[in-house]
């Protein structure tokens, strides 16, 4: 369309490809790697929780810096390089204390990257936020390639190869960040201009939304920490486990492709409520019926809701709730609350995995997702603006 700046689609997409390939390397296999090194479930839960705890600190610090300096792309590039450099320290030692330090250091920089890059991506969309999902789906593709490829690789080479594959992916993030052009978010207009971050945070339903974000990530604790170990104990091979993780992300990709139509028909609030409800059901299926392959596949397909529609709707919620000078802080708070919930989820699942087993631990996860459903229903305004109205204008 004439007069509308072009979107650097492939440059933005390549970053998401590598960034979420790294998540695909850590979510299914990090717990397996620590188990391979001989740590018990409590220590595994603690080591997995450390990067999530860094999401409580790093995004807000870097988000404040990005909003006040406007140098978001410089933060992304610095974070990518430092993530690689600090994770490479894993080759020096494998003790618990050293691994805990490596997890903390690399996560401090890793979690600086995405909230700032989300702001840059939305700025490149020039009032077309529905196109976000078309770019973000490449992150899901990167995740799929990582979980399937690494699952096969570890069947051949064993888990000693794990740190080397992670370093290769991190190098890809560094290269992709150097390729992306900069962009600054446009002002949202007089309604939000001049308002501070805290004032915008006190808008109706915003605080409740962030509480629900924390609960949703809390409910994912057993999934990201112990699902692979759970499936391995049920007799599934590492290759099959990688494919099962990929099934969930394929469903996520399809959801991202459909999100512009879904958000044109349903409000962001309705999409979030449906995502929370389906998460509550999914965790019960994974905890109690994962030995049945058909049920397991169905539960993985529900990843389309528990991550795909939830994340896309949450990004829209944050974008419309904050002004241009608070976008980085809004996205950073989203990442931080997700980090708090994820860390607590990893910790409680680590401590309770042996006494309660998979069924009991996933049942607690289901309760957390159900609590998010209730809060969203009761504490957010029922007449949220339809996301479909975002085509060409800001609410």
Image (spheres, grey):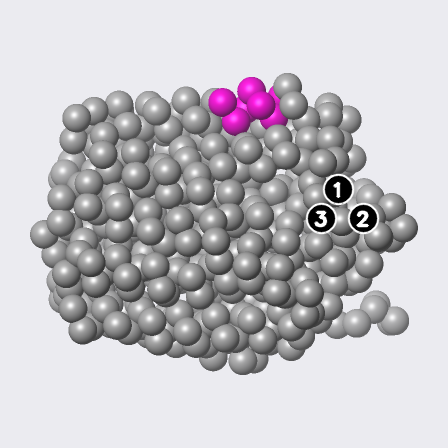
Q: Secondary structure at mark 1?
A: helix
Quadrant of the image occupied by residue 359: top left
Q: Which mark is residue 199?
A: 1
Residue 232 is left or right of residue 18, and the answer is: left
* Predominant secondary structure, magenta span: helix
Task: Answer with left or right where residue 360 lies relative to residue 40.
Answer: right
Q: In the rendered image of this protein, does residue 157 appear above or below residue 59?
A: below
Q: Residue at x 20, y 58 (%)?
A: 97
Q: Are marks 2 and 1 in contact (CB under 8 Å)?
A: yes
Q: Is residue 374 found inside the magenta-colored segment of the image?
A: yes
Q: Secondary structure at mark 3?
A: helix
Magenta residues (range): 371-377
Q: Position of residue 296 (x, y in %)?
A: 31, 34
Q: Which residue is mark 3?
A: 197
Q: Is residue 166 above or below residue 253?
A: below
Q: The C terminus is located in which quarter? A: top right
Which dot marks residue 195? 2
For the question of whether residue 384 can be seen, the reply is yes
The structure residue drawn at horizontal position 81% and vertical position 48%, both measured from the top left corner, is 195
């Amino acid at each position: 369309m004439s007069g509308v700046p072009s979107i650097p689609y492939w440059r933005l997409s390549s970053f998401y490809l590598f960034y979420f390939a790294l998540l695909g390397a850590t979510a299914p296999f990090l717990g397996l790697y620590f188990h391979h090194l001989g740590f018990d479930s409590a220590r595994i839960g603690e080591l997995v929780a450390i990067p999530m705890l860094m999401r409580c600190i790093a995004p807000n610090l870097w988000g404040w810096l990005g909003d006040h300096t406007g140098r978001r792309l410089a933060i992304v590039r610095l974070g990518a390089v430092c993530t690689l450099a600090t994770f490479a320290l894993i080759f020096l030692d494998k003790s618990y204390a050293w691994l805990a330090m490596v997890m903390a250091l690399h996560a401090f920089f890793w979690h600086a990257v995405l909230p700032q890059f989300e702001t840059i991506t939305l700025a490149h969309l020039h009032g077309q936020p529905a196109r976000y999902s078309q770019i973000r789906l490449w992150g899901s593709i990167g995740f799929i390639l990582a979980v399937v490829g690494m699952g096969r690789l570890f069947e051949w080479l064993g888990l000693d190869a794990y740190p080397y594959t992670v370093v290769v992916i991190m190098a890809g993030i560094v290269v992709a960040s150097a390729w992306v052009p900069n962009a600054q978010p446009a002002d949202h207009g007089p309604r939000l201009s001049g308002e501070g971050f805290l004032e915008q945070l006190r808008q109706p339903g915003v605080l409740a939304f962030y509480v629900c974000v924390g609960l949703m990530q809390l409910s994912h604790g057993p999934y990201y920490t112990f699902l692979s170990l759970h499936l391995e104990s049920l007799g599934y091979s590492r290759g099959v486990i990688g494919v099962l993780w990929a099934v969930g992300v394929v469903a996520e990709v399809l959801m991202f492709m459909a999100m512009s139509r879904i958000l044109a028909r349903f409000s962001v609030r309705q999409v979030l409520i449906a995502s929370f409800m389906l998460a509550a059901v999914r965790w019960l299926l994974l905890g109690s019926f994962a030995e049945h392959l058909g049920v397991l596949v169905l539960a993985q397909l529900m990843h389309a809701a528990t991550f795909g529609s939830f994340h896309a709707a949450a990004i829209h919620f944050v974008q419309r709730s904050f002004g241009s000078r608070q976008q980085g802080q809004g996205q950073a708070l989203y990442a931080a609350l997700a980090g708090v919930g994820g860390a607590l989820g990893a910790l409680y699942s680590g401590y309770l995995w042996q006494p309660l087993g998979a069924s009991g631990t996933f049942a607690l996860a289901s309760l957390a997702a159900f609590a998010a459903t209730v809060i969203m229903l009761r504490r957010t305004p029922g007449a949220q603006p339809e996301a479909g109205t975002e085509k060409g204008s800001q609410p």
